Image: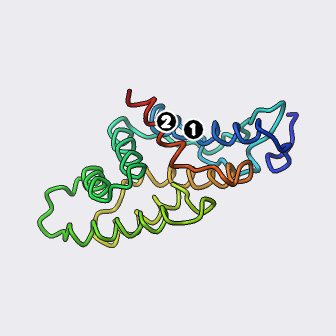
């Protein structure tokens, strides 16, 4: 296969646009299609003629329609920086909406802390994959573990954001998410 590692892609507007398209393609693969390349580290991505190509489809993931709907709402809550909405979506996703033993205000406070930590971070640290990883830890601590099928998607998002940072370290994943959501919801 012809091409060069994405780290070696020539500087320019094509590289910046490719980073945006790569991240958006993952939102689409996971949330719209429900089927995604689950190992998108920079070694599995090649650059050729101003395009990114995926290699090694040995690890793929699949997500059902119900979870995809919840992920769309979750992404919307992150984009809107709405901790209450994110808490509600997480509880819906985990089936814990009516749990009497759950301290919802405390859970929401910790969810808000995670969101604030990442939204106030430098652009290079503002990544949706790690936010979801930390959300998973908070959810588990409160006895509402995220669905296991989400684990591979979280891993893939974290990896693809590392790859996009190689191409464009200034890319704001929330800006890309917002534009993706506007097209997906409308």
In the image: residue 176, left or right of residue 84: right
Residue positioned 41% across, 54% down in the render: 148
* Residue 158 image point, x, y percent: 58, 55
* Residue 167 image point, x, y percent: 74, 48
Q: Out of 27 and 63, give the one closest to the viewer.
A: 27
Task: State which quarter of the image contains the N terminus.
Answer: top right
Q: Secondary structure at mark 2?
A: helix
Residue positioned 38% across, 31% down in the render: 185
Up-down relation of residue 11 to residue 81 (above or below): above
Furthest residue to the left? 100
Residue positioned 52% across, 45% down in the render: 175
Up-down relation of residue 33 to residue 99 (above or below): above
Sort mark 2 into few (<14), some (14-19) or many (20+) by Cα contacts within 10 Å.
some
Residue positioned 77% across, 50% down in the render: 43
The answer to the question of whether label 1 and label 2 lie on touching residues, with beta carbons closer than 8 A, is yes
Sort mark 1 into few (<14), some (14-19) or many (20+) by Cα contacts within 10 Å.
some
- Which label sits on residue 24? 1
- Quote the CA–CA distance across marks 1 and 2: 7 Å
């Amino acid at each position: 296969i012809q091409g060069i590692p994405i780290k070696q892609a020539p500087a320019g507007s094509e590289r910046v646009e490719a980073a945006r398209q790569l991240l958006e393609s993952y939102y689409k693969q996971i949330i719209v299609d429900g089927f995604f390349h689950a190992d998108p580290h920079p070694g599995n991505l090649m650059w050729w003629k101003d395009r990114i190509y995926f290699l090694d489809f040995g690890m793929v993931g699949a997500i059902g329609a119900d979870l995809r709907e919840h992920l769309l709402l979750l992404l919307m809550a992150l984009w809107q920086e709405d901790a209450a909405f994110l808490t509600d979506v997480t509880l819906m996703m985990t089936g814990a909406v009516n749990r009497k033993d759950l301290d919802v205000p405390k859970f929401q406070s910790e969810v808000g802390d995670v969101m604030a930590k990442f939204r106030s971070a430098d652009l290079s640290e503002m990544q949706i994959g790690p936010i979801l990883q930390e959300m998973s830890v908070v959810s588990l601590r409160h006895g509402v573990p995220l669905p296991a099928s989400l684990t591979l998607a979280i891993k893939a998002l974290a990896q693809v954001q590392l790859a996009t940072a190689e191409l464009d370290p200034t890319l704001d994943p929330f800006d890309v998410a917002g534009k993706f959501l506007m097209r997906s919801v409308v």
